[in-house]
Amino acid sequence: MDRNNLLLDEANRCLLCKKPNCKKNCPIDTPIPDIISLYKEGKIKEAGEILFNNNPLSVVCSLVCIHEDQCKGNCVRGIKGEPIRFHEIEQEISEQYLKEVRFKDIEKDKGRIAIIGGGPAGITAAFILARKGYNITIFEAHDKIGGVLRYGIPEYRLPKQLVDTLEERLLELGVKIRPNTVIGPVISLDRLLEDSYKAVFIGTGVWNPKTLDIKGETLGNVHFAIDYLKSPQTYRLGEKVAVIGAGNVAMDAARTAKRNGAEVTILYRKSFDEMPASKQEIMETREDGVKFELFKAPLEITEKGVKLAATENVTDAEGKIRTKIIQGKEEFFECDSVIVAVSQTPKTNIVSNTTELDTNRWGLIVTDEKGNTTKKGTFACGDVVTGAKTVVEAAAQAKIVAETIDEYCKVSASQDIK
């Protein structure tokens, strides 16, 4: 049986619930029963259009979302059996739609908007605002847009060709892209607003790796996961690699290094149950042959490996479980290279070269629930506001902020007329 027939069988298992938990638990409110109904009727183009209009990154989310926590994990069918694999149906529909659809460059009569950062949030906002008639320019720090989609998620999880196709569709809409352009040092945020941009959207993500603050992090055999994942083919890691951390980025780095021929071990100071990575990611990482050393905390990195302290979980007086180092119980893990993967923070180039733009103590941009920053005409969302989150959360926030920008520009235009 071919894939299409298998997916049709899967669609036929759907109960088309009147109050679907799958949709309720989708961060971007994908109308799942409606899409499945159209799919069963063979109306692939109509289904694809609905998916794209609801979420321009639908094809991406079908591949990289944590489905077990969202649609799949909340399917009624899953209570007594196998949940519906909607994400596989979504992938087929969205990929075909994105490949076949062609957009027209409509008249740009609503003003100029700058989008800083061509990642998930920036791409989503660009699609929405360009289709409303705004003249959009994306300022991208890298040589190509995509952000984490291109430089953070490995090829085996998200083919870069899909990101290229998204870029092609943006260009069809008349969106301009300025690659290799970092806003702040030369072109400031204030300069953009002075140059007749009606509004500025910031969606730059979080690209500064957090450090462990231990001795040895500057050595030549130490790398940060967010940097490694940008171009893993350029790194010479050696035969044995240690990855410190247990989030999704750590899993991606470990699996990528493993696929490139290294023996990889993840070092983590807690248990499997406490890992921030999704259960699916952990399972697939183990299936790829990556090893795990648990309850081990790094003390120092050397050219020969990592000095580790044993840890244990203890319950404090308030009943909370805390992880502490066991004194006097140390060991050494030999390896050729170490990849540090303990989260990221925003770069400060925009904030340090502008005025009136507030950040919190973590360096994240302060906004209200609609994406308004403390600087007039400037809006933000995504990881640069929330810290590292998922692609679908960035897209969902960008939808809201795009509408906020549209309303702001309409009000500004009416005031100009008066």
Image (cartoon, helix red, strand yellow):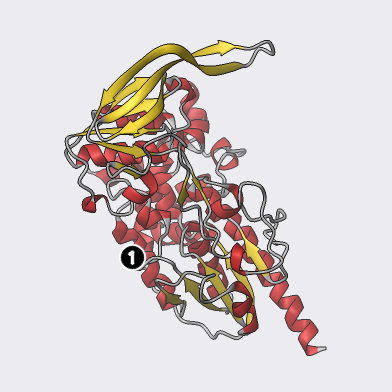
Quarter occupied by the C terminus: bottom right
> In the rendered view, does 130 fall on the left or right side of 379?
left
Q: Quadrant of the N terminus?
A: top left
Q: Residues within 10 Å of mark 1 (few under 14, many from 20)?
A: some
Where residue 92 sits in the image (x, y, percent)?
A: 34, 51
> Is residue 202 visible in the rendered structure shown here?
yes
Classify residue 362 as left or right of residue 369.
left
x 40%, y 39%: residue:
341
Give coordinates of residue 110: x percent, y percent: 63, 82
Residue type beneath disc 1: Asp
Count every numbered label the image shows and give the total: 1
Residue 164 percent coordinates (x, y): 33, 65
Instruction: Choose top left, top right, bottom left or bottom right for residue 294.
Output: top left
Q: Nearer the viewer, residue 291 or 311?
A: 311
- View extreme (right): residue: 418
Does residue 367 appear to the left or right of 117 in the view shown?
right
Q: Position of residue 269 (x, y in %)?
A: 44, 23
Above or below 338: residue 380: below
For the question of whether residue 9 can be seen, the reply is: no
Q: Nearer the viewer, residue 355 or 177?
A: 355
Residue under label 1: 164
Badge 1 marks a residue whose secondary structure is helix
Asked where in the image residue 328 lies, by quadrant, the reply is top left
Q: Nearer the viewer, residue 188 or 247?
A: 188
